[in-house]
Image (cartoon, rainbow, N blue to C red):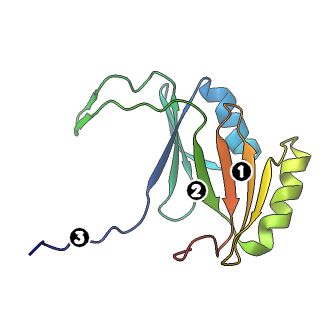
Amino acid sequence: MATPSPKIEGGLETALYVDDLPRAAQFYEEVLGLSTLSRDQRLYAYDCGPGSVLLLFARGATSDALKLPGGEIPPHEGAGRLHFALAVRAEDLGAWEERLAAKGVAVEGRMNWPRGGKSLYFRDLDGNLVELATPGVWANY
């Protein structure tokens, strides 16, 4: 008989790989209003709400293992136009659409989900697809 898996408590980090960290930072700070948790030459980390962090890595800066006093982080990379979603309140979706328009960010798509959730889709400056999603997108959200 198989041993049951320990419970996953939730997603913690979303990683994107960008060509220019300061340029990407300007987008995520000015357009989305994200607060910086940490910043160095290879990585900017942003607070995306309770227990959720957006990591922006300089493209190529994670190709080798990183040895730190507490251990080692294995190499990782991502290529192409990636996608991630940020949770927003349903009553704020209209305000988000207005903010994006005011910042010159085009909404590329909209979705009304069968469970009642709604999503807005737009691109960051590296071509990644950002989704703002309200509750009702998934059975667990």
Q: Which residue is mark 3?
A: 6
Could you tell me if the residues under marks 3 and 1 are in contact, i.e. CB atoms within 8 Å?
no
Q: Which mark is residue 83?
A: none
Instruction: Indicate which disc, 3 or 1, sits on the residue closer to the N terminus.
Output: 3
Q: Quadrant of residue 114?
A: bottom right
Q: Looking at the image, which is closer to me, 42 or 109?
A: 109
Count neighbours of disc 2 (C-alpha within 10 A) and say few if under 14, some if 14 to 19, many if 20 or more: many
Q: Looking at the image, which is closer to me, 46 or 115?
A: 115
Percent x, y of residue 26: 71, 35
In this view, the mark in front (2 or 3): 3
Q: Secondary structure at mark 2?
A: loop
Residue drawn 64% across and 75% down? 136
Percent x, y of residue 74: 28, 33
Q: Amino acid at mark 1?
A: Gly
Q: Secondary structure at mark 3?
A: loop
Q: Secondary structure at mark 1?
A: loop
Q: Which mark is residue 33?
A: 1
Q: CA distance from mark 3 to mark 1?
A: 35 Å
Q: Quadrant of residue 73?
A: top left
